Amino acid sequence: MQLIGNWKQALSMTSVQAGGAIAALGVAEQLLPSLQAALPPVAYGVLGLLVMIARVILQPNLMK
């Protein structure tokens, strides 16, 4: 396995941040069952699409 050249900037990447948001929502939903009623299942699909879109969008501030 080979890491990308700017792996140290991973937390600045939009796709990593969106993936972290999905993970945080998943954990919060398990800890607070009342969130299951408030958060529709389609929300995870939308957030997943955001991760894919964010992964292919150029982020010039990371190219430095």
Image (cartoon, rainbow, N blue to C red):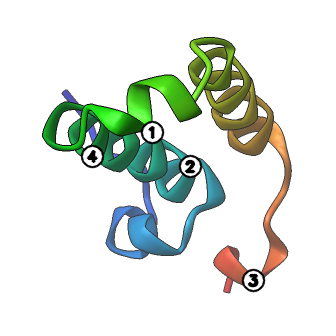
Spatial separation of the CA atoms under disc 4 and disc 3? 31 Å
The residue mark sitting in front, 4 or 3, is 4
**SS for callout 3:** helix
Q: Are marks 2 and 1 in contact (CB under 8 Å)?
A: yes
The amino acid sitting under disc 1 is: Ile
The amino acid sitting under disc 4 is: Ala
Identify residue for label 1. 22
Spatial separation of the CA atoms under disc 2 and disc 4? 15 Å
The residue mark sitting in front, 2 or 4, is 4
Report the residue at 68% width, 39% height from top.
55
Q: Nearer the viewer, residue 30 or 6?
A: 30
Specify the quadrant that holds the C terminus: bottom right
Spatial separation of the CA atoms under disc 4 and disc 1? 10 Å
Spatial separation of the CA atoms under disc 1 and disc 3? 24 Å
Within-10-Å neighbours for mark 3: few <14, some 14–19, many 20+: few
The residue mark sitting in front, 4 or 1, is 4
The residue mark sitting in front, 2 or 1, is 1
Q: Position of residue 34 (x, y in %)?
A: 35, 36
Within-10-Å neighbours for mark 1: few <14, some 14–19, many 20+: some
Q: Position of residue 42 (x, y in %)?
A: 68, 13
The numbered disc on residue 18 is 2
Lower sequence index among marks 4 and 3: 4
Tag count: 4
Within-10-Å neighbours for mark 4: few <14, some 14–19, many 20+: some
* Relative to 3, residue 9 above or below: below
Identify residue for label 4. 28
Spatial separation of the CA atoms under disc 2 and disc 1? 6 Å
Spatial separation of the CA atoms under disc 2 and disc 3? 17 Å
The numbered disc on residue 61 is 3
The amino acid sitting under disc 3 is: Asn
Q: Nearer the viewer, residue 60 or 19?
A: 19
